[in-house]
Amino acid sequence: MRFGTKIFFSITVFFSAAFLIGGYILLSYFYEMTMDREVASAVEQYQYNKFVLQANLITRGQEWLQGAMEGAYDIRYIVSDMNDTVAVFSMEGDALYSDFPLDADFADFLAGVTRNRVDYRFVRINNRMYLLTAGVVEHGQAAIYLVTGADVQRILEQQKQIIEKFGVVYGATMTVGAILIYGMSMMLTKPVKALTGATRKIADGNYKERVTDVGKDEVGQLAGNFNKMAAAVEEKIQELLESAKQKEDFVANFAHELKTPLTSVIGYADRIYQKELSREEQKQAAWHIWNEGMRLEALSLKLMDLTSLNHGKFILQEVEADILLEELAADMEYLLEKNQVELVCKAQQVYIEVEYDLFKTLIQNLVDNAVKAGAKHIRITGQAMPDKAESNQAESDKGAGLCYQIRVQDDGSGIPKEEVKRITEAFYMVDKSRSRKQHGAGLGLSLAEKIAQIHGSRLVFQSDGHSGTTVYIDLKCREGGVV
């Protein structure tokens, strides 16, 4: 059963039951109050009739009452002064006088009447309801029953009319109420239906589906959170798709990188084995095998480094940034001189936390990548500056609001803008022919990105594809270390 239908039936049944119970209580209360008034009025009429009868008995004496009971005297003229319908019976149950219909039977009623008490009972006579009041009237040694009857059939008919009118009002009210409740249930469940439709579309793969125009109530808040969840799911799905594509590219590139040197190694090895070669041709073939072997060695080492970075735990230690960068620049002096590259290092004295060997690999990879891009001038700078990510922290928090930015800038061939986002993917190479000549496998920047992540940072590349590349690395630093 749908939620809107549940709301409709639940509210309808509740109000229907409440209306019926309330109507029953009110009608019952009205009926009881009316009957109580009738009983009180009937008792009053009985007391009046009893007074009239007792007055006549006192005037005429006990002998007259005894004679009337024996049938010697007619008491019709006495009861003519009484109100309502009246009947007089002897203590043996014989009727001395009665205004009631002939078929009226009072034997059971009179059997329960006791002295010094007025009893009443509702009795149906000739399809009409009477309220009977009875008691014993005594004079001396003689006693008789006095019965007074009030026709209350009109009250029952009024009650029936009220019930019929209540039924009409109930039917009309429930009809209008059902329409209103149905409209309200549709209005209340409309946002839920929108959410259900959106979830169905997202389940079918349309992750861009969103819910709109749902108000600001609790359902609206639920829809807002649903939209946020859908956006997060869409983003995550996109990330998974990109990750899957990267893995596919990784496998394809890895297979390709293995195939090329292995083909060359197998080919030259077969040539040496199958043919009689001169010393010079053997040296040439051996050199190709050695060259491709170096490529495979470099590839395996890079892959091992990437694997170790994913599973290793590293301890960062506080060092002086300017000394660290100068040491790294000195370690790369041989490489730079060999390729006739000028390196300038200028760093502000600040304390940063790094893992020395990993950070050295990071800088070396960036410099080596610049050299491979044909750079002749490389500039490494380090400077403390405000950190936007931490600018809202309390001033008393030591080191809050500062970061140490390292820039590695070169004048090489640069990186095309459309390829900047993919530059850190494994095996991705901007110039594949140049990279292979230099034993590159497209893993250096992937390794550098992993190391930056271990240091709580990331590599940011800036290049127009023509006039060199600038790489930014932001590290946390301690304000007390700034000179």
Image (cartoon, grey):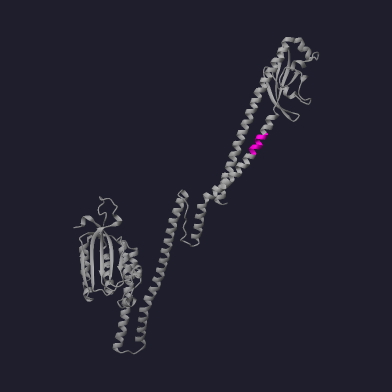
**Vertical arrangement, residue 372 with respect to residue 73, above or below:** below
Lateral position of residue 177 relative to residue 215, left or right: right
364 or 408, which lies in front? 408
Image quadrant where residue 408 sits: bottom left
**Vertical arrangement, residue 280 with respect to residue 307, above or below:** below
Residue at x 67%, y 32% (from the top left corner) = 158
Q: Position of residue 61 (x, y in %)?
A: 74, 9
Q: Is residue 140 visible in the rendered structure shown here?
A: no
339 or 258, which lies in front? 339
Q: Which residues are magenta?
A: 160-167
- Magenta stretch encompasses residue 106: no
Residue at x 23%, y 55% (from the top left corner) = 479
Lateral position of residue 394 relative to residue 186, left or right: left
Q: Position of residue 42 (x, y in %)?
A: 67, 22
Q: Is residue 282 visible in the rendered structure shown here?
A: yes
Residue at x 28%, y 57% (from the top left corner) = 387
